[in-house]
Image: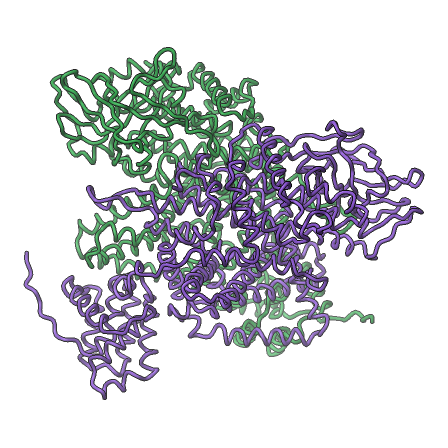
Chain colours: A green, B purple
Amino acid sequence: MSTLPVQYPDYSPGILSLLPVYYIGWADSILSPSEVKLIRKMVNQLDFLTITDKRQLVEWTNPANPPSEQLFKHWSTVLQKKAKKLPETSKRSLVQMGLEMAKQSATDQEILKWQTPETEKALRDIESALGITDSPVAQAIFHAPPSEQKRFDVKALQVILDDSYSETRNQMRTLLSDPAFELKRLPVKEDHRNQVLEWCKHLADRGFGALSYPEAFGGKGSMGHYIAVFEMLGYHDSSLAIKFGVQFGLFGGSVYWLGTDYHHKKYLEDIGSLKLPGCFAMTETGHGSNVRGLKTTATYDSETDEIIIHTPTEKDGKEYIGNALHGKMATVFAQLIVDGESHGVHAVLVPLRDDKHNTLPGIRVEDCGYKLGLNGVDNGRIWFDQVRVPRANLLNRFGNIDEHGKYSSPIENPGRRFFTMLGTLVGGRVSVPRAGLSAAKTGLAVAIKYGLKRKQFAPKEGLPETTIMDYPSHQRRLMPHLAKSYALDIALTYLTDRYVNSSEEDIREIETLAAGLKSYATWFTTETLQECREACGGKGYLAENRLADLKADTDIYTTFEGDNTVLMQLVAKGLLSDFRKSFHDEGFMAVLRLLAKQVTTSLTEKNFVNTRNTDLAHLTDSEFQLSAFKYREHKLLVSVSQRMRNYLRMKVPAHEAFLRCQNHILELAHAYVEKVVLEQYIERLKTVEDNTIKNVLKRMCDLYALSTMEQHKGWYLEEEYIHPNKSKAIRRVVDRLCKEVRIDADLLVDAFDIPKQCLAAPIAF
Amino acid sequence: MSTLPVQYPDYSPGILSLLPVYYIGWADSILSPSEVKLIRKMVNQLDFLTITDKRQLVEWTNPANPPSEQLFKHWSTVLQKKAKKLPETSKRSLVQMGLEMAKQSATDQEILKWQTPETEKALRDIESALGITDSPVAQAIFHAPPSEQKRFDVKALQVILDDSYSETRNQMRTLLSDPAFELKRLPVKEDHRNQVLEWCKHLADRGFGALSYPEAFGGKGSMGHYIAVFEMLGYHDSSLAIKFGVQFGLFGGSVYWLGTDYHHKKYLEDIGSLKLPGCFAMTETGHGSNVRGLKTTATYDSETDEIIIHTPTEKDGKEYIGNALHGKMATVFAQLIVDGESHGVHAVLVPLRDDKHNTLPGIRVEDCGYKLGLNGVDNGRIWFDQVRVPRANLLNRFGNIDEHGKYSSPIENPGRRFFTMLGTLVGGRVSVPRAGLSAAKTGLAVAIKYGLKRKQFAPKEGLPETTIMDYPSHQRRLMPHLAKSYALDIALTYLTDRYVNSSEEDIREIETLAAGLKSYATWFTTETLQECREACGGKGYLAENRLADLKADTDIYTTFEGDNTVLMQLVAKGLLSDFRKSFHDEGFMAVLRLLAKQVTTSLTEKNFVNTRNTDLAHLTDSEFQLSAFKYREHKLLVSVSQRMRNYLRMKVPAHEAFLRCQNHILELAHAYVEKVVLEQYIERLKTVEDNTIKNVLKRMCDLYALSTMEQHKGWYLEEEYIHPNKSKAIRRVVDRLCKEVRIDADLLVDAFDIPKQCLAAPIAF
């Protein structure tokens, strides 16, 4: 049955103004009965339409008689023709397009009718009611195809990522490309450990170990350089990064930060050159996260002027201590007891082995055996049986025993003293997430390069197969992670800068920041490498393709340097106590002001228009994104505070009240970290001068912001901060951004400039 | 400043009816200005309140003057006293309690006022407006403390989980407890592989290998028994399960299902006894998921009556083939070419090695090397260079070459033939998720036992530390996974039963089911073991505690037997084609009926009351839960179908249209699988006779259903299927269920009856 071609009349300006919306409405989304009802009602209310216009437009919404295929085709032709005449811009909404087309065909007098804000609003309402803003079809038809996107200069982007330490990074790139650093698979842990030790010596020989120590001891006095090296090692065998961190960061760091001149002169140079390998013996089997409750004792014996290190029971042994098999000495954290009085946890240097590498009397070391990963690090357990060391071995910067056997400390309060001691070690929390991020980047580079090369399934027999990176599900898997890796890079650089330049005033804030970013970034690493493995299928499971080790090695980062869940609670505690302080200081009026502020917030942030605004320009507006992130943090902060206050008022004990709010509290901590990450990204963008690079980075920022909002859409909808249509629009924009980022994906991973030897996965080439 | 005790008057019935709501409103949630406004308005509308009542109730909502601590305490005393007099029941809402208390204090005449449905509705509206149903404080104060929950008989529960194969399971429990099966860590892959081969021989010697083959070949003709053994091996070293599956399931299965009498007689007994170890050589480097596009050829040479197996180019080599190093023979999948004509993919038996285990001429085997896990399985790559085998080696059940060199097949259509051949191998998709589930259960058992034992952080110095399983965040981590493991156990048992009893009519449906459940369950395994590892901190990272291997070994299950993302698309395609068929059959009227049905659905399912109903009894009603799951599946099915139809109408090519809807399609597949799981759980519950067990299982079912809904709350809110308050209420009920399930957690993992030797993690004891 053939049909004769139908002649369609020219459309009136009124029809044209709605044609794009109708076309997309029918093409891309579902005109449900309620939507049909709504459009009809709205169309009838538009007073710039003629009766004929209205009749036609209502007719076209009949679900029992949807536009025929020919009519549809005609619409498409009309729209494409008209669209060509419009000035070029990529961010035109359907409504704007409709209006411009209407104006093209209208008389001068008619044009006046179209130029009112009411008209635009009325049309926009229809668009929004249908939730069709920026549909993929709309893009395909009206916007420039994304393949015309401009490419950019990879080197210029790399310079931005390399931040202030590009020289050190480049030195490390050269070193890690040396045949001596070729990655090897050594399944027997002893072989692997020896290889890692050897690599570590290479690094020490070239001065990389001592970077954070003063020049007098072979260093550069720069934690920033140390962290840059550590981050670069994250691309290589992670066992090396961790071994390096244990020796130079933790062991050396404890001597440097907790010790005084005597210790620095005696040990630092040998530590930096790896002549004196050592351990950082803090964690005990019974006490992982709760360091304050450690059981090992360091009892001062005034008769011999010695300190006796002792493990009370089997389960109080030091656990998971890196370098335990290779180490000659350990910084042991123990309860210091002087003259029968306990002064809390202090650090004492304890020799472990003699020149022939035999353990010294009273010391027992046990290998932790194989682990999920990091088998190149010699973790062990250590027990002390009344081991005596000279008084001078106490790392005495924050607590000293003088020659008369008297204890004294510059910090009176034992709680504050303890936290000050721990605080000097915050470097670990700044470094670990950076090495984790390098591993995630390596995984992304492998998976993305594979995804751009690998083809599977043809549209039809005989046609070429589709590149798997062109599958939207594959883009969804990898692109938001790629964007987040950029966001985290910027946030961690910010953290490093803050940390390197910290003063006594802001160290508390930086500790909170470090705890939060460490957790957020290491969870990201675990999640990303899992996606990358799955995205590479069976190939991702083979050791030769790197992902296996990257994944297994970094899995523990969420536990290292403080368990993430515990750290996130610290973050929230910090936020809550700052918030509570504002109450104490200002009293009850503050509560009222707060409530008042809440109302204002609801008015400004949750007003009808914003809640429903689904424009691309609005959704990709940094101000909107940041205010949404801030709203979430603020709302959670207020609600947790109030819940806590109410529980306390009901005489629920504080610990119990905290427990009851625990999940709520963890959500708050997340919201805070996410806000910081977005805020810093937006700040960083402002300083980028090259516009092409800026656009690329902005697109990634949008993808980070909107995919994060999408993750929390349940919360935003519960709070009625966004309307369901806006939530759907966010999903569509994320899909679109994934598609756009995919085009640059190869360059975006090239900008990491990962040393080739570290990327040595056959599927990545 | 001390305050004299205040004398409070007795409360009127009107005040009492609202007292529980007020108490909880002030204690547990935040009375925001808009909420205060709302309560005041509602209170003023309640005509059963006196003017004095109203004045007092409005006064108590003043945010500038919230109830004093003493008043609060007084409320608490009143409520507790009154609550004691009420009949015992755990599912009383705040409103019901208020009403009952009011009745206790009211005159007979007054009581009449309270008994109208309007009164109850008015009160309920307030409760719902505040979103305070079933708050944790309400439970703590008014409900029996959860520790009084009744314990249950573990054995009785185990019998349910062991389903129809308890005898086989118990035999396996005995065997896996034998010292010969003690788990060992053998880091060098060759040692590990030899150990696994030895274990496999033990299993074959005891007849476990041949279970699925007919009795004539040493078996029991029962796939059900085979699957039960495979599932039990999932508790042990997973390399053994996979090796077992490759030999007896894939290699043996291909001979049994694709071969005919000749092959059965010649090979099956030797395969079942492991005298003939073999491979299943399907996947090629270039073609993982797209099996139809395999490049290896099997060309019939009529002159010699042989078939020539050939790998055209290097990248067409067989990849990832299990048993490649130990195997003597392989079932090779290749394009069968007879007389120059290609007949699509067929399977041919090809000898690989001679008696001395040297590879035969033309055959090249390469070790895949180390992998993320499963290093006890000898995966390799195989290339064939013009290898000749006799014609009889064609597994010819679905395609035969006769003695005249003529090809024939009982299935005319090559596409259908191909899918029929693959369909006979669906057993792998039924088995793999079961072994994965065993691994997840083992992980849960380790993590939960550790969580119940491990203590960290004391409420105050001097007090005992808190058991980590009492932290709500820890419960949130593990309890929903525990509940889901039960849900999946029931669903996979259902799948096995359907598969074992399948007929030609329902095999398509079972394939869809298997593809969906395989994906859903293996993703669950990966996710669960990750949570378990993190929940055990550093201890979880040590190989001795099992989680490392469980996690690494099962990570590939999401790719094995079909990549999950690809399988989920198959599932959706099945659903969509069934749906489309109903259009073709019934024509356009069907579309209209469908739309009409949608409206009805909106009316019945999304009416105001249900959308906002936050009662515990409603939320834990299986009917509500299932209808929510069904709504999601149906809605997604309709919307994907319509989108697809519209794209096609716009002349978007089918492949392209499918791509554009891909993420939508994957969501549909998920919704379908989740519906099946819940449906089967509810069905299973109906047949449980022991009421204590039934209650335990119902609680787990509720936790599965509601935590799954919580995961999708963004979607439900977008669809306005639930109101924000209901979404919050679901979160609270999930918190509550986590707490309740935690009490039984030890027994719930004991009911798995995992062989002790498989659970041999020091932290689990």
Q: Quadrant of residue B462?
A: top left
Residue B753 visible? The answer is yes
- Please state which of residues A439 and B321 is positioned toward the viewer in this rendering: B321
**Drawn side of residue B316 relative to residue A226, left or right:** right
* Rendered image quadrant of residue B723: bottom left
Tell me: residue B630, above or below residue A741. below
Tell whether B53 sits left or right of B605.
left
Would you place residue B483 above or below residue B583 in this image? above
Q: How many marks?
A: 0
What residue lies at 30% left-to-right and 58% top-to-bottom? B147
Residue pictured at 53% horizontal, 32% vertical: A549
Q: Is residue A115 visible?
A: no
Residue B642 image offset from top left, x and y in percent:
63, 65
Screen quadrant of the N terminus of chain B: bottom left
User: The C terminus of chain B appears in which quarter of the rendering?
Assistant: top left
Image location of residue A577, percent across then percent down: 24, 46
In this view, the residue farthest toward the bottom is B109
Could you say which quadrant of the image residue A11 lies in? bottom right
Q: Residue drawn at (17%, 79%), measured in percent from left and top? A: B52
Residue B124 percent location from the top left of the image: 33, 74
Q: Residue at x 32, y 45 (%)?
A: A569
Question: Depth check: B758 or A135 in front?
Answer: B758
Q: Residue B653: x and y, percent?
A: 72, 56
Above or below for A96 versus A578: below
Question: B490 or A212, which lies in front?
Answer: B490
